[in-house]
Structures are given as C-alpha cells and as structure tokens.
Amino acid sequence: MYRLGHQIKHHHWPYILGGLLIVGCIASGIVIAPRFFKANTMLTQSQSVTHHISAGDTTTQHIAKPLFAFDIPSGWRVVAPPAVQPVAQSWAGTAPDGAGRRLDVYMDSIPTALAINRLLPVQPTGSRLNTAGMVSDNCTNFTDKATEVAATGTAPAKWGGVNFICDMANYERDVVAIGSTAGINDVALAGATGTHLVLLVYTDNSISPDYSVFTAIVQSFTVL
C-alpha cells in the first residue's frame, strides 16, 4: 500500500505476540483446570465388624450329687425320670431355647436293653469322659433292616467301634447315649467313691436338635 510517494509498512508483531499469549493461556488452563476440579476426598475403608449370634443360652449351672457332678445349661430344671427301670435322675430344658431337651443320668443300675437312635462314643479316663468321636447319624441309616427283631423293633448296631442297640421302630426320635468299646451301655468311671457304671442319655425333641449340648455335658461329667 502506498501513499503518495511513500510505502506504508504494517507492523504484525503485536498481533503475533497477542496470539501466542492467548494460545499459552488456553494451554495452561487445560493443564491446570483439572487439578482444581479434581475431587480431593480420601476414602478410608473402616475395619469390618463381625457379630456372632448364639442360638441359645451358653451360661451353665453346676450340678453336684453325692456320686457325680456336671454342668448343664442354666435354664434346665429337675424333672421326673422316664418310666424305665432302673430309675434315672433327670433334668430338662425350658423355653425358649431348651424346650424339648432332657438328660437322664443312670448310675450303677444301667438299663442294658435301652435302645437309642444315635450314639456318642466315649473313652473313660479315670473319673472323667473323653469323647472318642462325633454323634452318629440316625442308626437306621447304617443298620441292616434284616437284623431287626420284630418283637422289640430293635437291631444290633455299631458306630465308631462301639456296639449299641438301635431303635429301628422309633426312627423319628432323637435319643442319644454314650457308649464305649467295653460293651453295650457299659461305661465305667473310677472316682474317690469307687468305680461306677454310668449311662448318660440325651433326648432332643426340639425343632432344631443340637447335639453339642450333650457333648458339652459329657465332657463336664465326673464321678466323685
């Protein structure tokens, strides 16, 4: 572009510098902006808490008799013994957790023909009992039906090397007894008062049978 006799020069540097400044600002904004908008919250996971819920009362009461002693759940009470000779000493649970559960203790006079549904093998050690296995399944599940005596509804059975009498006729009951390799319903303990034959029988007619109650009683039992 010319003016009369002269060339007019356009100075482009101010525009170029301005443009570079704008581009730089935009670039800086792209880098810096996310830092401002980024969440600055730190999440810390708290330690988990586990609650153990017991199905029943775990507190016990100590029973001491002239010849023996043991622990049973605190809510249990003395009840009339079953109509079986010889006579036992009996305790039973109460609602809400112990209803339908009972323990019969036979000392010296043992019902040798007593038939049961399940067996807990034990090993007599001095004045105390050591469990020698788990409570068996219902004996009708592993006892030969052909060996059942029709007159009594019972059959010879064996669990964990221990012989006992299976109540085949009343297979829906939950009657558990201790037993040893010495013989059927033959468990002998020696205490300060001498050697005594012992038979512990646990019946659980509750909605949810719990044989651990019986196991705990057996493990606490001692002849005096």
Image (cartoon, grey):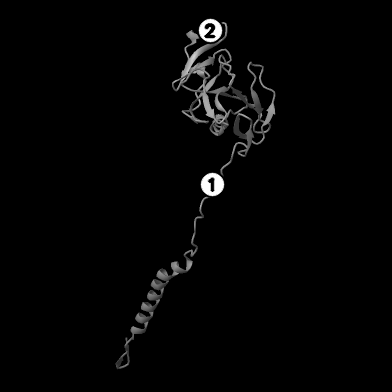
Q: CA distance from mark 2 to mark 1?
A: 52 Å
Q: Secondary structure at mark 2?
A: loop
Residue 220 is situated, as x and y percent measured from the top left of the image, at 56, 34
Three-letter code, disc 2: Val
Looking at the image, residue 143 lies above or below residue 203? above
Q: Nearer the viewer, residue 116 or 125?
A: 125
Q: State the residue at coordinates (41%, 75%).
A: 25
- Vertical arrangement, residue 114 with respect to residue 75, above or below: above
- The residue that mark 1 highlights is 50
Of pointers 2 and 1, the one earlier in the residue sequence: 1
Which residue type does callout 1 highlight?
Answer: Thr
* Residue 154 coordinates in the image, percent (x, y): 54, 11
Pair 2/1: label in front: 2
**151 versus 81 height, above or below:** above
Residue 139 is labelled as: none
Q: Position of residue 38 (x, y in %)?
A: 47, 65
**The N terminus lies in quadrant:** bottom left
User: What residue appears at the point 30 percent right and 93 percent down from the top-left corner?
Assistant: 5
Q: In what quadrant of the picture does the C terminus appear?
A: top right
